């Protein structure tokens, strides 16, 4: 797929992922402007939650899809950004994430794979991301409830199959192209592993 098409998919997906919280902030500001203090506590809650979700998602998107930067070499910072993103994905019942990596070259691959795992989880579950290039795995626990159709679509994209692109597929197309350009061999495990392994 052409780089420009992947850029379009990423831009559309990211815009979609932050639109709801931006709308919530706009609505809260509108209520503030109306001066109705009866809803003040609700407004504060909306602003706090929405700003936290937006910050978590934007930091994650910048680290995953943006230009290379020094933060990607900091394993603790990468882990914290990934943790915050996963916690912000599913509202009241987000998956948990165990993220452990020591090699900066693996971090962007792991972040994109974490995003894909979060995409297929229906609710709750646990994502484990560990290792480095050559020994790295990002996986969902075998007992987690997943969207099997979504997982199969991701597997098809990562295997290089010709498939009509939609914005939700942006992380999969990005990961496929990122690994292809760097000659990273990417292997998608099947249930119960539900994992991405690369070397």
Image (cartoon, rainbow, N blue to C red):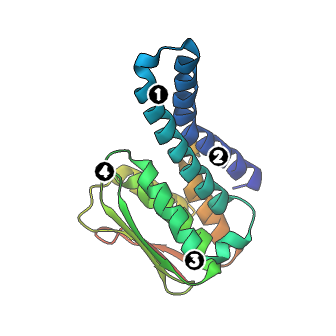
Task: Give the residue pinned by disc 3.
Answer: 75
How many numbered marks appear?
Answer: 4
Q: Secondary structure at mark 2?
A: helix
Task: Give the residue pinned by disc 1.
Answer: 43
Residue 140, position as x, y percentages in the image: 35, 66
Among numbered discs 1 and 2, the one appearing first in the sequence: 2
Single out the mark in the foreground, 2 or 3: 3
The answer to whether residue 60 is above or below residue 101 is: above
The residue sitting at 55% across, 30% down in the picture is: 25
- Label 3 near label 1: C-beta < 8 Å? no
Q: State the separation of the CA atoms marked 1 and 2.
A: 33 Å
Among numbered discs 1 and 4, the one appearing first in the sequence: 1
- Label 2 near label 1: C-beta < 8 Å? no
Note whether residue 100 is visible.
Answer: yes
Task: Give the residue pinned by disc 4.
Answer: 123
Q: State the separation of the CA atoms marked 2 and 3.
A: 28 Å
Single out the mark in the foreground, 3 or 4: 3
Q: State the separation of the CA atoms marked 1 and 4.
A: 27 Å
């Amino acid at each position: 797929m052409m780089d420009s098409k992947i850029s379009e998919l990423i831009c559309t997906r990211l815009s979609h992922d932050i639109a709801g919280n931006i709308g919530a902030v706009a609505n809260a500001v509108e209520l503030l402007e109306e001066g109705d203090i009866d809803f003040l506590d609700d407004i504060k809650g909306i602003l706090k939650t929405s700003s936290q979700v937006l910050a978590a998602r934007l930091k994650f998107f910048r680290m995953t899809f943006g230009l290379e930067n020094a933060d990607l070499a900091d394993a603790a910072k990468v882990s914290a950004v990934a943790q915050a993103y996963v916690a912000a994905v599913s509202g009241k019942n987000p998956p948990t994430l165990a993220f452990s990596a020591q090699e900066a070259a693996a971090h962007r691959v792991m972040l994109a794979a974490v995003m894909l795992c979060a995409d297929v989880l229906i609710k709750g579950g646990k994502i484990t991301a560990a290792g480095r290039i050559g020994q790295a795995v990002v996986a969902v626990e075998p007992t987690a409830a997943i969207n099997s159709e979504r997982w199969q679509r991701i597997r098809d994209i990562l295997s290089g199959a010709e498939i009509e692109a939609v914005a939700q597929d942006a992380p999969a197309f990005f990961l496929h192209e990122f690994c292809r350009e760097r000659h990273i061999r990417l292997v998608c495990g099947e249930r119960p592993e539900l994992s991405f392994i690369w070397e």
